[in-house]
Amino acid sequence: MQRKIIHCDCDCFFAAVEMRDNPELRSIPIAIGGSADRRGVIATCNYMAREFGVRSAMSTAHALKLCPHLRVVSGNMAKYREVSQQVMNIFLEYTEIIEPLSLDEAFIDVTGSQHLQGSATLIADEIRRRVKEEVGISISAGVAPNKFLAKVASDWNKPDGIYVVLPNQVDAFVLTLPVKKISGVGEKTAEKLKKIGVETCQDLRAKSLAELVEGFGAFGKRLFDLSRGVDERPVKVSRIRKSISVEHTYPQDLADLESCIAQLPVLMEELDLRYTKLKEARAITGVVVKVKFFDFVQTTAEHTVTYPDIAHFRQLLIDAFNRGLRPVRLMGVGYRLADEGKDQPLQLSLLGDY
């Protein structure tokens, strides 16, 4: 049976919720993020702010330089999770095969759905209409025979749009796609591909599987397949959490190693609290420390250990700090978790951090 996959993506989700709840925000550039004086970062912004060049993951200070009249809202994660659950509940009325990717997007497999004569296009349109009417925000959708194409398609007519790639349109759709549209192709990989004359999927098809595997390892096989519109990944309704972590960005740089070490007890307390909230007991197999220096260069250090204590984290922190020997703006600590135990169902309220 030909698979029917829909990728749904809420438009500027956090900002959309704030604009829904506060009419004053609907006609001005807004962003959700931390304050500039506390080294905040933009989580998302509305489309008016994007016209000024404001983007997710940008520092709030830089965003305000690009758009001085930008309204920065601190955000409310509890509210966003609640709205996300409302959207996911609508999805559940059409299929139980749902793979949330974050609070604001998910793959849904409607291959066997009997709703609306089994038409994925009609289902996607009805979902979009219901989300707007019942939740009060807009959502864009991509409909295609696989996950790769559906995700690309959902971005085609944003915001508040839908794009459908029929099975007989796959080849023509993929040929002109820039390789940057392929998940996993970041700036470095794109630059490496450009050096060998590859900028579109059509260019990529000119390379043999052997060439791509030699140049890109296991990812070469994925490049080979996706450039032909082939993606056999199922929509997953469960996963195994492989790690758990916490991190802090500090208002003032931590000037030296001693200042960093002094923050460990607080970080570890938060990590242990999060670990105890896991729904299934999972053995710890290792510990990780992440350090981001004031110039945004970051490094991680990790060690295999079954019964971790603060001494393990302290030594990893020393190792990580000594790689930079300069002030630190962010620190994180985490546990690696064993694969044992059953797959944990993805919570439809989601586990993503703000």
Image: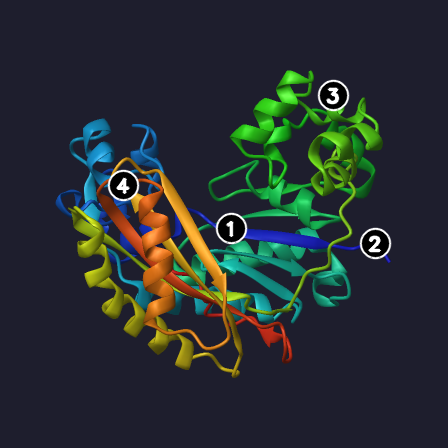
Instruction: Compute the Cα span from label 4 to label 2.
Output: 56 Å
Kindly report which numbered mark, 1 or 4, lies closer to the viewer in this rendering. 4
Q: Mark 1 is on which residue type?
A: Asp
The location of residue 72, given as percent across then percent down, is 20, 45
Residue 309, percent across and down?
37, 74
Local packing at callout 1 (Cα closer than 10 Å; few below 14, some 14-19, many 20+) is many
In the picture of the structure, the residue carrying the numbered disc 1 is 9
The answer to which image quadrant residue 207 occupies is top right
229 up-or-down from 103: above or below: above
Residue at x-position 74% and y-position 25%: 204
Nearer to us of marks 4 and 2 is 4
Q: How far apart in space, not on screen, are marks 2 and 3 (Cα)?
A: 27 Å
Residue type at the position of mark 2: Gln
- Provide the secondary structure element on which disc 1 rests: strand
For residue 2, the mark is 2
Mark 3 and mark 1 lie on one chain; the one further toward the N terminus is: 1
Is residue 243 depicted above or below 259 in this figure?
below
What's the amino acid at mark 4? Leu
Residue 263 shown left or right of residue 109 in the figure: left
* Amino acid at circle 3: Asp
Residue 203, which numbered label? 3
Marks 2 and 1 in Cβ contact (< 8 Å): no
Q: Left of 243 or right of it: where is 73?
A: left
Rendered-image quadrant of the C terminus: bottom left
Q: What separation in Å lies between label 1 and label 4 (alpha carbons)?
A: 42 Å
Give the residue drawn at x 75%, y 23%.
202
